[in-house]
Image (cartoon, rainbow, N blue to C red):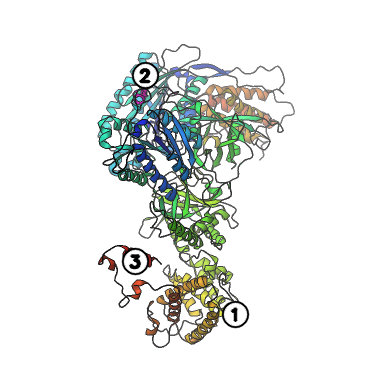
Amino acid sequence: MSEGAMKIFSESHKTVFVVDHCPYMAESCRQHVEFDMLTKNRTQGIIPLAAISKSLWTCVVESAMEYCRIMYDIYPFKKLVNFIVSDSCSRILNSWAHEDQNLQELMEALALIGPPNPRADPECCSILHGLVAAVETLCKITDYQHESRTLLLENAERVANRGRIICLTNAKSDSHVQMLEECVNETIHDQNKLAAGSDHLMQIQKCELVLIHTFPVGDDSLVSDRPRKELSPVLTSEVHSVRAGRHLATKLNHLVQLHFDLASTTITNIPMKPTLTVCDQEEQHANTSANYDVELLHHKEAHVEFAKSGEGHVSNSREPSLKETVTLKWCTPRTNSVELHYCIGAFRISPVDVNSRPSSCLTNFLLNGRSVLLEQPRKSGSKVISHMLSSHGGEIFLHTLSSSRSILEDPPSISEGCGGRVTDYRITDFGEFMKENRLMPVTESRYQMDGALDVPLGRAKDQLERYTRYWPMIISQTTIFNMQAVVPLANVIVKESLTEDDMLNCQKTIYNLVDMERKNDPLPISTAGTRGKGPKRDEQYRIMWNELETLVRAHIATSDKHQRVLECLLACRSKPPEEEERKKRGRKREDKEDKSEKASKEHDHEKKWQESERLKSIEREKEEPTEAEVIKDSPDSPEPPNKKPRISVEDVAPAEKSKGPMSLLALWTTRIHTANSRKHQEFYGRLNSVNNKAELYQHLKEENGSESVENGKASRQ
Amino acid sequence: MPTVVVMDVSLSMTRPVPVEGTEDFQRKHLAAHGLTMLFEHMATNYKLEFTALVVFSSLWELMVPFTRDYNTLQEALSNIDDYDKTCLESALQGVSSVVQQEWGASTPCQVVLVTDGCLGIGRGSLHHSLATLNQRGDSNRFPLPFPFPSKLYIMCMANLEELQSSDSLDCLERLIDLNNGEGQIFTIDGPLCLKNVQSMFGKLIDVAYTPFHAVLKCGNLSTDVQVFPRPEPVVTDEEIEPVPKVINTELEVVGFIDIADISSPPVLSRHLVLPIALNKEGDDVGTSLTDEVEDENSANQIAGKIPNFCVLLHGSLKVEGMVALVQLGPEWHGILYSQADSKKKSNLMMSLFEPGPEPLPWLGKTLQLGPISDAKENPFGDEDNKSPFPLQPKSKRSYAQNVTVWIKPSGLQTDVQKILRNARKLPEKTQTFYKELNRLRKAALAFGFLDLLKGVSEMLERECTLLPDNAHPDAAFQLSHAAAQLKLASTGSSAHSVYGLNIAPLQTDFSGR
């Protein structure tokens, strides 16, 4: 993730450690370690065991391992290490493959190599073997390079091959160092020629050689430090002369920070109360509470906000240098997990002193799933929270929080915008919908019928499509979703495939609704906005059945079982005979007409329009059973015995054209038309139309001018 | 993205422009005309943009601090006096400090520099600044590139021919280069007149201030939205993929995630998602007649009463504490969520992740996120009390796996003491004793630190002799067994220094477990 402006295939993509395993490395570093620390309650008079000291080899290996530890912690991917030891020949301890990229593998391989044999013949041993192998290994393609090249196809040449060789050795003199550099330079030249003719090797475009000469503490260095120098367009080299022991470790710690753009943050004021001391330190007094500091490394971009503040200006000096650690204060109270912070970066961390007690207490605290906010110490005493430490699945991240003024402050509230005045959104229902459409990580891969990989996210999108085929947004727009009785069907019908049980449940739901209708149970039809009692009970049921049908119909293409649910619904739903319907309609109209003058008809009208639209769409699609017998009150009723071919209804057909029994739709349409026509001036075009066709852009024939403007206005009304 | 308008008020801006029918028409009037047009455009179509006005000659002054009140800006524009010579460097320095004081170093800003292409003379002139570029230290750094992400738009009150006749154009191009290529130079096409200034500012509006309209979709539910500020194209790795990625105008919700699971993710930028009413083609630019404003008001009222998916989504995200994962392009995602400001006004907000197949390690690969209906058992539990997130990484980090580091003597001493402490509590602590012993053994073998093994072996032998009379007999057996094994390992002989082989507790008559 956030790796700043770093290129994936920079020098840091491939690091080769070449470690000297010659007999001389078995020498002591001459820095002593007391290991027999007698604890105070022991009997007097025992002489502690003599202090021991690490060999040069041990110093080199543990410093290199520490370099790798920090690197793997912060870049578990895309930054690779190859470890080579060199004595009478070169031995490569691991490969670029991802499974080889961890500390355990390296430690195991190092144990197998063991310390150098001080009695071996120094004449046969040389670091050169390792350096040659290092160049060879840099030419080998990594999985990431391979993947990118495959992905980029004709642009494969954009994938660069750069690398860094860190050579830890004991050199004899400056000229010895020069000889090593020349050897690397020549080897690169040779290997690049070889790689040019190979498909599985890559030419090295840039190589950074970091030669570290190390020697026992107390000795004089025979090699001088030298800053980075260009030896060829491909190769740069730098020389560090470092005393062994702690000094070497410090050097490599600095180098890892420079090589991987790291910076340091010290968390200060960490309270270590008993709750925090989960460490297995038995001799710790549980009730002491002190404040501790812990230093962490991370990508330097986590400090981007500090770069600005005056003194700490970003320097453009060529010479790489390390900044001092930035101090951030542990902040109580802690944050809770349901808060979404505005976070502009998150960076993996690595504690500098990983198994010190304060470090492990902090990391364990975080690994247990807690987060902590960090505060910038300010002279003024104002509190600025700039960072947050948090673990996600066993990895700890330093989150950078935005602490500057937001450019989005004082936005218009959502209630002031489109749809902001509507108050009956189905918020709870949509909440349920969201929960059903939550995502989860899918580990196993599935394949489609045609063998193509079935992408889980694609299935998630498909599911969203199915779930939203019929989804009214507001309560007053729906009846069925306000009814508990419909829930079993509504939950199931959206599924990709139905089981027999699902289908049975749907049928039961339908029978149940039939039952409700027979018992004349009230329905939760919204009467909001309408004057009076609202629709009659049988009208309510008709609306409900229509809506349910719309829902089921939206899913019939999914499977046969979905289709069967519709068939069941059509068989069971109530359809009053037209005769009766017309009577009712007439009666209703009279009722309404009385009040219609006073009533603000707008909403009423809108509802009816919606209703008629819904009806229209339904009638267009289906055949209409007409027989009275079709209405069964028994759940076991069979399919309707006979269906009449649908009456073709022209949506805009004038009412007088329809002969014989008028359809419900026709009645509606006429009514709506007359009602509407009273409300507005007839369109100019329609008034002057011939056969319902009006000629457009008439004015173009005439002299254009003020007329056209008027036309524009008229058509806008 | 806040905007800073930097207006050149040096004397050269008062050079007359021959415009038919008007007397005394100057370049600064052209500039003011262009800016008026820009401000009018923003006031109608880009209302939420914060804009500041800085004027400069040899000195600079912040005339209007960042505001959304375009009348104030307009007013300030008409009250500008004429001053002395052009000094761009100090003006840019001023812009840099104005922006950082207000927005910090991570908020992207647009800088609109209005000048006539006369770049000053002597010290403080742009020539001088550019000539001395290499002689600077940290204290007098050139202000470009700005320390914050920025675009530098240079509006020249001059045409190309005029600029090319001196080296002004080269110098201005240098400025854009110094700003890492972020920005553009606009010049007047043809003769200097109001019409051509308008078309130049029209181009700037097209480049930088056209509102970003999109369709927000969730399955079959959808709505038109404006995304503010407009999302800028993104380059993730200039070497591998130098073509900037642009976000789709169809923002498709692909699923939902709990806030606790998404867990304050790092984002590239944040944007308001504002629902907009359909079919408002009429009000594009500049038409702000009063009756149309009234029209708009009533249109807004009607739009307010029509159910909108944004409002529904926002309400439910807020109530449930969830975010919607939204697809922005191929391998590019973001999240939608409800964001409340200090005044408790809340809004639908969109945050963009960095493009890529796996923007958040704790969610895993985005394409590998599937519907929970795929699982046999609801991964969130029937009572919504668990979660399949966060995803555990395949390998543990060093701080989670009890690594051994002996760089500081204290690290080694602690490890030895752990062994010693357990040794004194044998046989109760046999398991921990051997666990710690083996950890030390492994590290010593890897580091080739055989002297340590020998030392610890001797220490254990001594412990054996120091056992009190009432000690459990097993303690002595285990101590001498462990000491002997360590001694063997310390010889480095291949049989006894196998890394993977642990020292096992001695099976004694006492260890009847």
Q: Is residue A700 left or right of residue A101?
A: left
Give how far across and how far down residue A237 sits, in percent: 36, 22
Label 1 element class: loop
To which residue does mark 1 refer? Answer: A520
Label 2 element class: helix
Query: Of callouts 2 and 3, which one flags the residue occurring earlier in the amino acid sequence?
Result: 2
Q: Quadrant of the N terminus of chain A?
A: top left
Q: Are marks 1 and 3 in contact (CB under 8 Å)?
A: no
Task: Please report, as a chain letter, where disc 3 is located.
Answer: A
Q: Residue at (34%, 63%) from the top-left corner? A: A709
Q: Is residue B21 left or right of residue B142?
A: left
Give how far across and how far down residue A308 sits, in percent: 48, 31
Query: On residue A711, which mark appears?
Result: 3
Give how far across and how far down residue B362 sits, in percent: 50, 45
Query: Of callouts 1 and 2, which one flags the residue occurring earlier in the amino acid sequence?
Result: 2
- The residues colored magenta run B128-145
Q: Amino acid at mark 1?
A: Asn
Chief secondary structure of the magenta portion: loop
